Image (spheres, grey):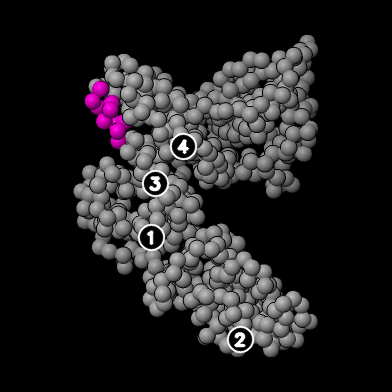
Amino acid sequence: MKADALAPRALFDGAVHYEIPVFQRPYVWSEEDQWAPLWQDVRRVAERVVEANGDQDALKEIGGHFLGAIVFKSKPAISGDVTRHAVIDGQQRTTTLQLLLDAAQKAFTDLGYADEGEALEELTVNAAKRFRGKPEQFKLWPSRSDRETFAAALARTNGGQYSEHRIAEAHQFFSTEIRAWISGEYEEGEPEPVGTEKQRVEALTDVLQSRLLVVAINLSGHDDDQLIFETLNDRGTPLLKADLIKNWVFQQGERLHADIDSWPDRFWSDFDDDWWRDEAPQGRHLRSRVDTFLQYWLTMRTREEILVDETFRAFTQYASDHMKTVESAEALLTELIRDAETYRLLAESPPDTAAGRFYRRVIEEFELAATTPLLMWIISENHQVPDDQVELALGALESWVIRRTLLRYTTKDVNRFMVSALAILDGTAPEKIGTALFGYLSVQTAETRLWPSDDELQEYLPSLRIYKTIRQSRIRVVLEAIEQQLRSERHESVRLSSPLQIEHVMPQKWQKHWDQQPPLAGEAARERDRLVNTLGNLTLVTQKLNGSLAHRPWTDSEAQSIAPTGREAGKGKRSLLSKFSLLVLNKELIDDHPDAWTDADIAKRSTELTRLICKEWPGPHQFGPAADGADEA
């Protein structure tokens, strides 16, 4: 077995043919989870190459982007044939890399950059005439179900017949993004692409040929490839970014002749705890908590967007200036461990505190982890922000997140936006932090950064079909907050402890017991389908009550006409809510609608709940005064 770190230029050099065995699963990677993050990584490295402007020292500092591992097994060589490899692990990664290379090659060629296009074509196609029209024409031959689409994409014979296949979608995604970036196109709120068109083409060629790195593991003939595959995927213990950083930190301590025997207990022992090394959800992925913390900590400290794969390099670059003396090194490590303690306590913060509430709602339920560096900065003991300013800052940021989510605004630019907000706070007096962040959020006008006003919510939210377009856990956060607001105004304040579920007052399958005479059809039926999934038709109930309510009609008189089944036969939905639910949300439904629950009632309640949302999460005009001198980035 031989392992090397290889770039595409080495991995696909010469007449090679990587074949994915028929038993491997088909291509399943997606835009949200893999293609878009990969393209952002590639683009970011390419932009750094452009900015280096040929400076060799600067180019060396850029390094490359690590894609992961590919495990393959070489087959015996035959004279005149391609060099054949069977891909044992990493088929999704290898397929995506080939689609990216081909999309870039075609974009270069179409835009008149023939030399760069030819250079990339050598990495996707075996040009010899003897391979034309055969699978060996391609450097990669995917699993059986993907082959036709893959060949059509690379040969430009798709014709639209494979448009909904993941392979075709991936190729189209990379093609669109590459062409837009090369041509200098960008959306409002995004930074303008750097350099000239030719510089961008040359930089992207450099990155795709030489700066995308994989660990290529070539199994020799006597290796048990199945055993190695299982070991890699099931029993391996990965080396964390934190492990690399720890080694570097202690090396620096030795160089400074520090008392490094005391450093583990003072600065690092906590990170060796199982809690830190355990994996926790990070978006749709699992990562160790310590690596996640270090990534966010570096973003907070450097005010730059730090990617997962850049954590070690970014840490060494940032910390080097602090490793000049023992005193400065220990000061940095003291601040690091203090922020780590704050990060660890976040998940345990009471929900009635600003930090605890923000963490549960925004980080956990709304899964907007990109706000974590800003949250950490605001509550860090190193910054000593007063409680009232913490409340103002996190309240404004939470409102910004929830209002944008409910209106289904994009989160495309949120990473950059949080970094720019960090830059605004840096240098601001602690007693003005909340005011400064509120002001900065308020003045944004770009679509990717706009903080929706009350008028916007009241105009659009009542009619939006939010169920199934917004995750139920997020809708539940909103309805629970409204329930608590109503309780604090007119009832005893009791914390909701048991998990509640979303319930449609008028059921989604309304045709069964909620239709009218004559039955709704056509556009009227489609409008009813939309209406039952709007905010005004949603409430909260326990799981057990949810099952009992089912598709029942609203009143007992309507329910009694149905064949009796179960313990609550003959009871309408209103009676069951009255009997079992203690929520103010449901009490108002029961009291105000004794005879019917209609389409007009849904529309009216949508408007009322939107008003309560505006009250719970005040917007830019109601929350507080804008900060003096806050400018849009």
Question: Measuring 55% from the left and 62% from the top, which residue is drawn there?
Answer: 499
Determine the secondary structure under disc 2.
Answer: loop
Q: How far across and down, in percent of the image, does residue 508 sit?
A: 66, 71
Q: How far across and down, in percent of the image, does residue 398 sit?
A: 39, 58
Q: Where is mark 3, residue-wise?
A: 345
Q: Is residue 579 above or below residue 243?
A: below
Question: Measuring 31% from the left and 65% from the top, which residue is drawn there?
Answer: 623
Q: Amino acid at mark 2?
A: Ala
Q: How far across and down, in percent of the image, does residue 309 sit?
A: 48, 31
Q: Is residue 562 magenta?
A: no
In this rendering, the count of numbered labels is: 4
Discs 2, 4 touching: Cβ within 8 Å: no
Question: Measuring 62% from the left and 79% from the top, which residue is drawn there?
Answer: 576
**Label 4 vs 1, first from the N-terminus:** 4
Quarter of the picture containing the N terminus is top right
Span highlighted in magenta in the image:
326-335
Q: Where is mark 4, residue-wise?
A: 276
Q: Where is mark 1, residue-wise?
A: 352
Q: Amino acid at mark 3?
A: Leu
Q: Where is mark 2, residue-wise?
A: 596
Instruction: Give the Cα distance between marks 2 and 4.
Output: 54 Å
Instruction: Give the Cα distance between marks 1 and 2.
Output: 37 Å
Going by the image, does 496 lie left or right of 265?
Answer: right
